[in-house]
Amino acid sequence: MAVQKKQILNKAYLITGFMFLFAIAIVYKLVQIKFIDGEAYREIAEQGTVKTFEITANRGSVYTSDGSLLATSVSKFDIRMDVVTVSDADFESGIKALSKSLSKMLGKSAGFYEKYIRKARANKNRYLFITRNLSYNQYQELMQFPIFKLGPYRGGFIVEQRTVREHPIGKIAERAVGYDDYRGRVGIEGSFYEFLRGTNGKRLKQKIAKGQWKPLNDNNEIEPIDGKDIITTIDLNIQDVAHHALLGQLEKFNADHGSVVVMETKTGEIKAISNLGRTSKGTYFEQRNYAIYESHEPGSTFKLMGMVVALEDKVIDTSTVIDTEKGVITFHGKSVRDSHRGGYGKISAARAFELSSNVGIVKIINENYKDNPDKFIAGLQKMHIGKKIGLPIKGEGAPIIPDPKKKSWNGLSLPWMAYGYGVSITPLQTLTFYNAIANNGEMVKPRFVKEIRTQNEVISKFEKEVIDPKICSQETIDKVKEMMLNVVRRGTAENIYDENFSMAGKTGTCQTEYWTDKTQYISSFVGYFPADEPKYSCIVVIHKPDKKIGYYGNIVAAPVFQQIARKIYTDTPVQAEITFDPQLAASDSNYEDYYKKANTNYKTVPNVKNMPGMDAVSLLENLGFKVSFKGIGKVKSQSIKAGKELKKGEIIKLNLS
């Protein structure tokens, strides 16, 4: 009995000991949680209910050279309501008036909004959705609605601000302007993202029901810093002309895609660039930057490069007689043919270029360089043919020039090169060479950006960059300039000749997909104007026009060049009639603020003639007008004359260029 009692006591002592140790462990854990690791656990708990959200800074805006917006960040506001925080007295006194105000702004009936909000109050909804994507002016108006004007704590007003990227002129030059988002970094936006991006801010939010987050106050913890603005070289008038000239020709010939670039001869500034591709529905939009990335066989526009090399080496002169025979010449069983059946007979080298004789040009190059093709290639390379330009915009296509030292070189390589086959070059690389000829031998790098600004301060300025001060002798330049002038006067592009306006250039017609039974064509024209004192150079390339309608470069591409040249010098106003305040043009990227400043002190109708259309519309709408307009570009006329008394609500009609 005593033994049994002792065993029971031992078990009791053991259990008591375990319980004592367990109690000590619990006390230790409590002390650890509260005093040792307490801060960490409190932080974890707080993170579950309170969190810092990043506020994306407004990106800098992208402008044309004349101050028109190409891309900008616009604030958009989403509105919600904490229905629970509103007192019964405030709610009942203001709900009907609030519902009427919401109905007037958002469209649904006042009864709908009253029922919607009352139901949310009954369900104790603290994050009721009201509307999204409001502009700054709409947001300011909605803030003054009954109940909402009481603020976030008494009126339950919740606002969340976002920034979205908009292109005020639509799809024009969209690919060149580019983007920097989930799709990658493309164009000017992508290449200059470090300047355009600002510094993000921070805002504290609290977690509420159903995994939603509500801002704790109206102020940000850290205010975002907006990005810097990019001033491009693009001229809106020239861009508008180039875009529509290309679009019209693509539609006329039902072509697959095309590009056009206009460059200022002396500076290399790109004044217009348009890249349009056909959709499955037959419409056209900016799909890819063909002018920069698409390296392809150029065809006859490459003949200028070969002629310059031959003239520089003095293996021919412009008066050298070439026998084009009957318009056909054969190499290793493959024929080179002239478009003119029967050939041109015996003609000068200059005339062979003017008529774009394949046989004539091939004979010039092959007969003088077949024994030493390296010399011909060296002549091209000396003029930077076959090298990338080194553009700031990513995606430049790699040029291809055959190398006699490689195994791929064969008996067809040299003659095929002579008339633009077996080589590959982008439209902008071709234009850079032609622009150098127009610029008396000085090759300048194409330039898309003039400067980077923040408000009134110029952060960085981009000056003209010379690739080569003289790509060849002035004697050769003078000769090929005369030849290109005669291409338009009496050669393959005589159909665009205008006795009142001089142009010079070269047509190009190149077969593509010729290795299949469905041969297509690439039509091109590249040149400059005016011919005597070149101010602009321009290239037009159109891929796969409908062969039944036409495919030669002079018919498909040259008229686009002609239209651009003519409009720049005849239809485009030389001087604007409005002088803008430079402080407004340099205003920060919030264009709501821009127009607010621009509208100050207007008591009469402003003169918006020659103002960019999108700016004029925004200015007039902010003054209270109802604006209707036709066309695109700058304002040609306005229905209400400048200086008349300003009456809000009136309709004003604008005709754009």
Image: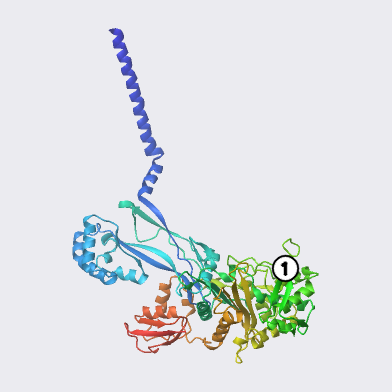
Q: Tell me: 45 left or right of 248.
A: left
Q: Which one is nearer the viewer's eye here, 299 or 605? A: 299
Label 1 neighbour load within 10 Å: few <14, some 14-19, many 20+: many
Residue 581 is situated, as x and y percent measured from the top left of the image, at 47, 80
Q: Is residue 103 among the parts visible in the rendering?
A: yes
Q: Which one is nearer the viewer's eye here, 122 or 405? A: 405
The quarter of the picture where residue 538 lies is: bottom right
At a point 67% along the width and 71% down the height, the residue shown is 421
Determine whether 214 is above or below 355 in the image.
above
All told, the count of numbered labels is 1
The three-letter amino acid code for the residue at tag 1 is: Ser
At a point 70% along the width and 74% down the height, the residue shown is 336
Secondary element at tag 1: helix
Residue 530 is situated, as x and y percent measured from the top left of the image, at 62, 86
Determine whether 617 is above or below 396 in the image.
below
The quarter of the picture where residue 619 lies is: bottom left
* Color encoding of the figure: rainbow
The quarter of the picture where residue 534 lies is: bottom right
Q: Which residue is mark 1?
A: 413
Q: Is residue 537 among the parts visible in the rendering?
A: no
Residue 598 is situated, as x and y percent measured from the top left of the image, at 42, 79
At a point 77% along the width and 85% down the height, the residue shown is 319
Residue 639 is situated, as x and y percent measured from the top left of the image, at 38, 88
Determine whether 648 is above or below 445 in the image.
below
